[in-house]
Amino acid sequence: MKTVIINGSPHKNGHTAALIREMTSELNGEIKQYNAYDMKIGACIDCKYCFKKPGCSIKDDMESFCNDMENADVFIVASPMHFGIVSAPLFTLATRLQRYWPYKNGKRNIPDTLSPKVGCLLMTTGGKWVNMELLSDGAVNFIFDHTNTKTLGSIYAYQTDCNAADTQLDVLAEVRRTAQRINGMVSEKSFSY
Ligand SMILES: Cc1cc2nc3c(=O)[nH]c(=O)nc-3n(C[C@H](O)[C@H](O)[C@H](O)COP(=O)(O)O)c2cc1C
């Protein structure tokens, strides 16, 4: 089982990293982690290269990320909430997943080599308000859709300004349960995108 995790937090040992640690403590197999703040990635420039060929005209750190993600069984997206959505570097990375849209929507005949994946969103927020998940869940659903990832939903550690994510035991337990569910689904190949 191969897992790719993208972390959108600037803090290597922050709240989002605490949720990722819990997830990786349970997940089987090989795990590759990327941090959007360490990657050199430009935003999509809508050049329409991917309308003609698989891939992207911009050659940057997206290439190795996409190679790993395209062959993974599991894809975990993790981010702090910034301005109601994922962090800016992660959002920039998301725009570059547009390369997978043309084939999925019939604009190009040559397919991408995207494995079916299962995954989820791990999110941390400093505060909490009604429906605060709408923008972040919506944007990350684009990520899962573009990458052939069946999502098991999102797990939020709220109000990290008052309660550190690594002290929210109910949330950590939910993360571990989701990891175990993912292990089972991949070993039984009981999901399709
Ligand atoms: C630029 C910026 C914007 C933020 N916007 C929000 C927000 O919209 N809603 C919220 O609840 N917290 C917001 N926060 C707080 C973070 O989501 C919170 O501190 C998070 O748990 C940090 O996770 P990390 O330690 O993994 O970076 C923001 C923080 C920053 C730096």
Image (spheres, helix red, strand yellow):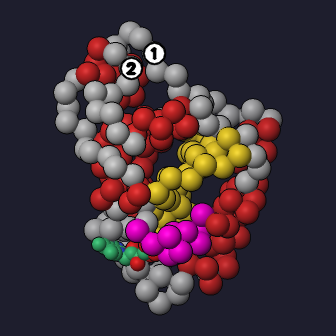
> Image check: 27 left or right of 125?
right
**Residue at the spot of label 2:** 54
Q: Which residue is mark 1?
A: 111
Q: Which mark is residue 174?
A: none
Task: Say whether residue 19 is magenta.
Answer: yes
Packing grade of label 1 (10 A; few <14, some 14-19, many >=20) is: few
Q: Nearer the viewer, residue 189 or 128?
A: 189
Q: Is residue 92 above or below residue 66?
A: below
Q: Is residue 107 visible?
A: no
How far apart are the alpha carbons under marks 2 and 1?
7 Å
Q: How many marks?
A: 2
Q: Amino acid at mark 1?
A: Pro
Which residue: 64% across, 66% down? 21
User: Which percent across, then down, holds residue 118?
Assistant: 62, 41
Instruction: Please give the range of residues in magenta.
Output: 10-20
Residue neighbourhood size for the residue with mark 2, other residues' Cα within 10 Å, grouped as few (<14), some (14–19), many (≥20):
some
Residue 2 on image: x %, y %: 68, 41
Residue 109: quarter of image:
top left
The residue at the point 33 percent across, 28 percent down is: 56
Q: Residue at x 50, y 75 (%)?
A: 14
Q: Are marks 2 and 1 in contact (CB under 8 Å)?
A: yes
Q: Quadrant of the N terminus?
A: top right
